[in-house]
Amino acid sequence: MQARGITLKWSFERYCQSAHYSSEKFRQEIFVEYPELQKQDPTWELLYREKQSNMERMLKEDTVSLMPGVQSLLNKIQSANINHVVVTHSPLALISVVKAQHEVLQNIPHWITRQDYTHPKPHSECYQVAVQRHSKPGDRIIGFEDSPRGITSLLGVNSKAVLIAQAAYPEIPGFIERGVKVFSSLEDAASNEL
């Protein structure tokens, strides 16, 4: 947006409350609040390609910080030799850049990226693929997500679901009723019994 002379005035929480639902919702809300952007590219195709290109460039230029508590959690899981999988909407090309920056990510044995499934979250296909490929009957599965569409996806498989989110998503009370544990950080989750 800056390259197009527009300043995005959203906080990170406001961004999450739009982008973590669907790309369509994000596109609609951006166009409503920034109609000059829609005039520049009403189809969103060019803007989306620019967004992807800029994200890849930024990932290569700067080290991505891990969410607080990720390093510690992964170290414990890996030390205990517990099977673990990352299920992400991100493409393999972006994941490869981030993995190269953090040894603890390189030690994760299994990755399910956007190329591994057809239907995006909130469809549960991505988690179904992970369970089919990387679990055995009787395994106890716990999943961590950071968005409503991710939790909805995770709830489609037999697992304990944990939402790590600072944004005040309106679905949280309904998720809690369905057994989802909700924490503002992985550090908070680690200090509670899951």
Image (cartoon, rainbow, N blue to C red):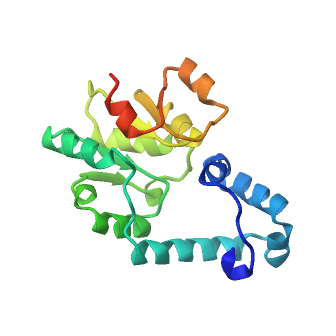
77, above or below 37, in the image: above
Confirm whether residue 42 shows in the render: no
- The image quadrant that residue 172 belongs to is top right
Q: Which of 53 and 63 is in front in this view?
A: 63
- The image quadrant that residue 78 belongs to is top left
Q: Nearer the viewer, residue 91 or 75?
A: 75
Numbered disc total: 0
Question: What residue do we see at 75% from left, 74% from top?
Answer: 6
Left or right of 143, for residue 154: right
86, above or below 39, in the image: above
The residue at the far top in this view is: 177
Q: Quadrant of the C terminus?
A: top left
The spot of residue 190 in percent (x, y) is 32, 32
Left or right of 92, for residue 177: right
The spot of residue 164 in percent (x, y) is 47, 38
Confirm whether residue 83 shows in the render: yes
Q: Quadrant of the N terminus?
A: bottom right
Question: What residue do we see at 28% from left, 57% from top?
Answer: 105
The spot of residue 113 in percent (x, y) is 42, 56
Left or right of 169, for residue 101: left
Question: What residue do we see at 35% from left, 37% from top?
Answer: 187
Question: What residue do we see at 65% from left, 70% from top?
Answer: 48
